Amino acid sequence: LDSLLAQGFLKVKSFPSVITELSFSSFDEYLHSLSYSTRKSLRKKIKKAYSSADIKVRISDNIDDIADDIFRLYENTYHSGATKFERLTKEFFIRAARNLAPRSKFFLYYVNGKLSAFNLCLVYKDLFIDKFIGFDYDISKKYNLYFVSWCFNIEWCLKNSIRFYQTGQTDYHPKLKLGGKLIPLYAYLRHKNFLLNLFLKLLA
């Protein structure tokens, strides 16, 4: 895309993405790729979560009957984040399920029968993109649902021969500790007004 620079576009750094390469034959092998302290902490969190509550995971291509719950969890996460991107709508999640199937999958986390977290994921060949998430934070913090979902997704990828697990921008610290690597992303932009474009170049 650098050929766009000759056409007056600006190249600016964006938030990097995070990708975890899953060149492992089993989940245990993945765990042993982590540092001792991270591995010990992760096992402790997962064991505590499953021993303290009835946690079940359902994978679905259709969310028509729970769209309100999905959107409520998404809104929780959107409003709690320090960095905000686009604000999605309930209709977005309904249409993503309908129009992107079978590549779109909702991973639904139920704690004691209540939907408490979700991931909207996209699957294409050997790439798994964990695109949007939502949490009931009172429950998710108590039962470590962030780490429960991370481990479930890793295991699912390994069982389905998926090599790359992409977890997107922000919240980098836990993702890097869990084996992720930063992937640079850039934005290319050009203003229609020539003079404003020159000014933008100075800012860039």
Image (cartoon, rainbow, N blue to C red):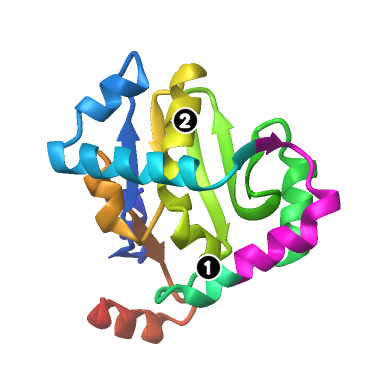
Please give the range of residues in magenta: 58-75
Identified at 49% across, 47% down, the residue is: 52
Number of callouts: 2
Quick check: is 23 in the magenta stretch?
no
Quick check: is 67 in the magenta stretch?
yes
Residue 1 vs residue 144, the one in the foreground: 144
Identified at 53% across, 23% down, the residue is: 125
What kind of residue is marked 1? Asp
Residue lying at the far top of the rendered structure: 25
Residue 88 vs residue 8, the one in the foreground: 88
**Above or below: residue 200 compared with residue 130:** below
Task: State the mark number for residue 138.
Answer: 1
Residue 77 vs residue 91, the one in the foreground: 77
What kind of residue is marked 2? Leu
Q: Secondary structure at mark 1?
A: helix
Residue lying at the far left of the rendered structure: 36
Identified at 35% across, 46% down, the residue is: 45
Image x and y of residue 153, in percent: 48, 35
Rendered-image quadrant of the C terminus = bottom left
Q: Does the rendering let one see residue 186? A: yes
Task: State the mark number for residue 127.
Answer: 2
Residue lying at the far front of the rendered structure: 52
Marks 2/1: CA–CA distance: 31 Å
Q: Does the rendering let one see residue 23? A: no
Q: Is residue 11 left or right of residue 93?
A: left
Classified by dominant secondary structure, the portion drawn in magenta counts as: helix
Mark 2 or mark 1, earlier in chain: 2
Q: Secondary structure at mark 2?
A: strand
**Above or below: residue 77 compared with residue 82:** above
Image x and y of residue 198, in percent: 31, 81
